[in-house]
Amino acid sequence: VKLDELYALLKRRGVLWPSAELYGGSQGLYDYGPLGHALKRRIESAWESWFLGLSPRYHRIEPAEILPEAVVRASGHLENFTDPEVTCGNCGAAFRADTVLEKVRPDGVDGLSPAQIGELVQSHRVKCPSCGKEALSVPRPFNMMFGLDLGVTGKEKGYLEPETAQASFLSFPRMWDVGRRALPLGIAVVGHAYRNEIAPRQVLFRMRAFTQAELQIFFDPAEFAPELGPLGSLALPVLRAEDRLAGNETVREVAAEELVRSGGLPEFYVYHLAQSYRFYRDVLGYRPASIRFYEKSKEERAFYNRIQFDIEVELESLGGFRELGAVHYRGDYDLGRHAQASGQDLHVTPTNHPPVLPHVLELTFGVDRNLWALADQHLAQDGERRLWRLPAYLAPVPVAVFPLLWKEHSAEALRIVERLREAGLPAAFDDTGTIGKRYARADEAGTPYCLTVDHETLDPAGAGFGTVTLRDRDTKAQERVTIDALAVRLAPAQRFPRPGPAAAA
Amino acid sequence: VKLDELYALLKRRGVLWPSAELYGGSQGLYDYGPLGHALKRRIESAWESWFLGLSPRYHRIEPAEILPEAVVRASGHLENFTDPEVTCGNCGAAFRADTVLEKVRPDGVDGLSPAQIGELVQSHRVKCPSCGKEALSVPRPFNMMFGLDLGVTGKEKGYLEPETAQASFLSFPRMWDVGRRALPLGIAVVGHAYRNEIAPRQVLFRMRAFTQAELQIFFDPAEFAPELGPLGSLALPVLRAEDRLAGNETVREVAAEELVRSGGLPEFYVYHLAQSYRFYRDVLGYRPASIRFYEKSKEERAFYNRIQFDIEVELESLGGFRELGAVHYRGDYDLGRHAQASGQDLHVTPTNHPPVLPHVLELTFGVDRNLWALADQHLAQDGERRLWRLPAYLAPVPVAVFPLLWKEHSAEALRIVERLREAGLPAAFDDTGTIGKRYARADEAGTPYCLTVDHETLDPAGAGFGTVTLRDRDTKAQERVTIDALAVRLAPAQRFPRPGPAAAA
């Protein structure tokens, strides 16, 4: 499946479309329609259920998404959150340096200096993608944050947050009290991040506004040691930085305990790699062979990270592996910077422990990118039939209810919709077209269960009284089920997998 | 309860706090902590369950929150979304005109021209609140939208959306197809709105970033006639504009059907007033005597509205009635403006009907303000005990699980937490302090159910094996309940009230 085809399908089904389409769209901004919104929320709930399920000491907060300048100065974003931009001396068009160098350096320009990028542009005689002339400038840094004026004076600057993490760091002192002064303390945010991309593209993969789900775990490095336990034998598909630098791009399956024993990684880090792997494989259901943990080298990773593995998944529509999340060991960089800049001591003193400036382990997850990946990997063709094989708990519409005949069966179908919604199942009602067409529509929307109300349902003399036809998306099998039994029968659509009992803290 | 006291309590409990507090806070921006976030989501879910429950043809979408300039030009915001601002010629401080005129005109300055406001400032010799000099300028309009540069050129302007409604209007053509080309069609958005308030204040009541829940119902005015039915006899507390203009500020209880018969209001409008009243009274549980529908006169209401009743609730902490939502009949203003500005015909042709430019009925709901109102109205003092009498389905933490003794009972308590979470109940674990202190903490957080695991729970020889103590927040009554029965017993915390079976469309 190609990117354009997949995007066309998602638009047609109202999963998403360009924002402000009536005015020709707004680059890098998308609106989610009903299916897209519902799927996005289910992804977020699955993420929350899983990662906040790791400990009762992890909490979700909802911070404002505008940061005052002092924050982005302290975090380094004001200085460093830039992309190299080249402009055309002939036509004036502007581009991200990596996009004009795509053929020359398909892996991007991370780690190259502006001068090195400039040399590449020159030596390969790269032409302006707009006008075709060889007139591209030496790159200059372009800050990707969106700035705002706060208030009327023009003196107070704010920024749309370039990442949700800063809000977690800022909330740490309050959360220390809320969490009853114990470590580890997890702070999760599902929120927007904003980046003024020079060249938004690939639909949900380089957007100007997107949703991140992140968990920052604040811990004492002398104490934090979640045990691998049975996870020790889990084989993780890793591509180590040292292997890559030695020219070996082969993913190796390495047992988690082996990564600790001889791989030089701390157990707490590997534990979270393993739990992440389970999430991508078992909860989101990506094909195991399509998942890899891509280690960034010291030169490649963000300067504040001590260890960084990106979680990459192979996507046909994007022609290769793409980053969908990451596990960052940020050390004490963040609290240290904010302590320095704000003049407030951020050391904490857990009961019976010496004071410590907590370290941060950060689990990041791109909600939009994963939504796309779920379409890429789970949309399938079965002969003439197109179906979206989403796990039931991720299906945007877990159950659709059809009246066989509009006039005779609508009232009962709506009663069933109401009853399922009361039980917490977001049931949909569809009375348009033949039952076959409605099945086709439901298959394409990923709906695992379709219910049809017919004359049997309503005939008190018949054997089918009080039953409906339940049809399974994947097998197409049909059976009669009593209405009273539906809530239990459809329960798989309401249960998000969880990582297992949390250890006593 | 005073505003400052209530705010202090909410901060202390981690419901909310000033954003970027580490740097002294950012005016008009707040972060929600774990309790605040959970309560906010429950309010949003309750709203969605109720208002999307009105029809299976109502859908929720999630649009981008940045609008290109063409949109806010067409909507009128670029020209009209202004507040009169006065600046001090002496010290340079800037103020919203209504804030400096608060004592002179407590009802605000809506409908006054800049010249009239200037005269009031002059004639009452209003002093600068900052420096105390009589040096305030004549008001000038200050546009309250936050502007952004999109891309690198500096030529493409965007704006943080000043209201979520525009995104609904823009999505109408896509949603017309998604909704299978039938009216009424409802589009709901729960999203952020941004306003560069000159003088943010009163915590959640005048913020620079806040959350709106809105439902725009697109309908054919010749066809849309939801029947009042049994709602006809519901008495609605109205303050009519004509009564107010005649000097009568008394709220009258008028039966819904009477508002149609002799009150000059269309039935579809009154139907939604009545459903809104039920929501505020029965779902959010505000005291009936504290709710009123405040009709805006032609001069007071937004120019695009044909009918506007604000939903106001009396709040002790704010010293009077405050707007928490509204019902706006916007006619065909919005689609008309966007059709004209975009050059696209937005008439639609439902099956067997003539083409129509749909009208819009808009139900707005301020999520943050209602969160505050739920604290104002439901936080109670019972002797020494402070408790937050939230309905169980709104409680941020519906159930808390306590091990009586940390060492002996934590593992079982965590198993119960896990089991309840698997069943969809966000249970919390609390092992800090005496059981009495934990009850007190839970009471203040609004937790309706507390469970305690003790030696009886684990003693296979005793009568209490497999049971826990369930303690009720409001009555303080305690009973032993078997762990297996908990999910059913606690079900009230999972069921949002619904408006009743939707009528066949």
Image: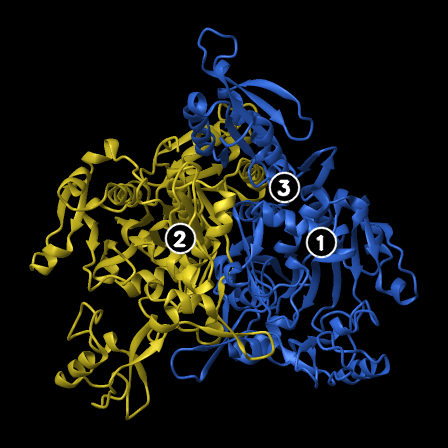
Chain colours: A blue, B yellow
Question: Which mark is first along the chain, 1 or 3?
Answer: 1
Please tell me whether mark 2 sits on a helix, a strand or a loop.
strand
Q: Position of residue A275 (x, y in %)?
A: 70, 48
> Can residue A226 be seen?
no
Q: Is residue B262 above or below residue A450?
A: below
On the image, the x and y values in percent for residue A173 come to 51, 66
Cα–Cα gap, marks 3 and 2: 30 Å
Label 1 crowd (10 A; few <14 / some 14-19 / many >=20): some
- In which quarter of the view is residue B76 placed? bottom left
Residue B369 x/y as whole percent? 34, 57
Q: Is residue B76 visible?
A: yes
The residue pinned by badge 1 equals A3
> Which residue does the numbered mark 3 point to in the structure image?
A498
Q: Amino acid at mark 3?
A: Arg
Mark 3 or mark 2: which is in front?
A: 2
User: Would you place residue A487 above or below residue A387 in this image?
Assistant: above
Query: What whole-number distance in Å separates the C-alpha atoms at marks 1 and 2?
Result: 33 Å
Marks 1 and 2 in Cβ contact (< 8 Å): no
Q: Nearer the viewer, residue B256 or B491?
A: B256
Relative horizontal placement of residue B168, taking residue A142 as reference (left or right): left
